Image (tube, helix red, strand yellow):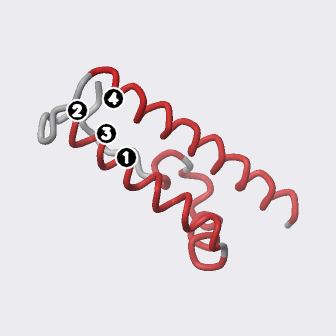
């Protein structure tokens, strides 16, 4: 259990420039990034016992976060391929 938030720049440190550009230019990516940030915040608050939740709910949130990370990784890969 980690009490450190996992922002997208921490998850993809080599792709900071791409992440920044996508946040500015890609509405779909903005939606994904916002949802990721929201989920990440909820997970962090649950793990820190700021907002306790059930283990099942925490696992569901983590699965959703992983799915969004996969989607972000796909978008980054496609952006690199198009460059």
Q: Is residue 19 above or below residue 44?
A: below
Q: Which residue is mark 2?
A: 47
Q: Give the position of the N terminus as an image quadrant.
A: top left
Q: Which mark is residue 57?
A: 4
Q: Are marks 3 and 1 in contact (CB under 8 Å)?
A: yes
Q: Nearer the viewer, mark 1 or mark 4?
A: 4
Marked residue nearer the N-terminal end (4 or 3): 3
Tell which of 46 and 13 is nearer to you. 46
Residue 25 lies in what quarter of the image? bottom right
Measuring from the top left, give residue 38's x and y in whole percent.
37, 54
Describe the element under mark 1 as helix, strand or loop.
helix
Q: Residues within 10 Å of mark 1 (few under 14, many from 20)?
A: many
Q: Residues within 10 Å of mark 4 (few under 14, many from 20)?
A: few
Measuring from the top left, give residue 74's x and y in whole percent.
73, 48
Q: Are marks 4 and 3 in contact (CB under 8 Å)?
A: no
Q: Which residue is mark 3?
A: 43
């Amino acid at each position: 259990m980690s009490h450190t938030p996992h922002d997208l720049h921490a998850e993809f440190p080599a792709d900071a420039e791409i992440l920044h550009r996508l946040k500015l230019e890609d509405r779909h990516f903005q939606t994904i990034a916002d949802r990721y940030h929201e989920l990440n915040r909820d997970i962090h608050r649950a793990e820190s016992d700021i907002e306790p939740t059930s283990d099942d709910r925490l696992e569901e949130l983590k699965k959703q976060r992983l799915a969004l990370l996969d989607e972000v990784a796909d978008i980054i890969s496609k952006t690199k391929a198009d460059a």
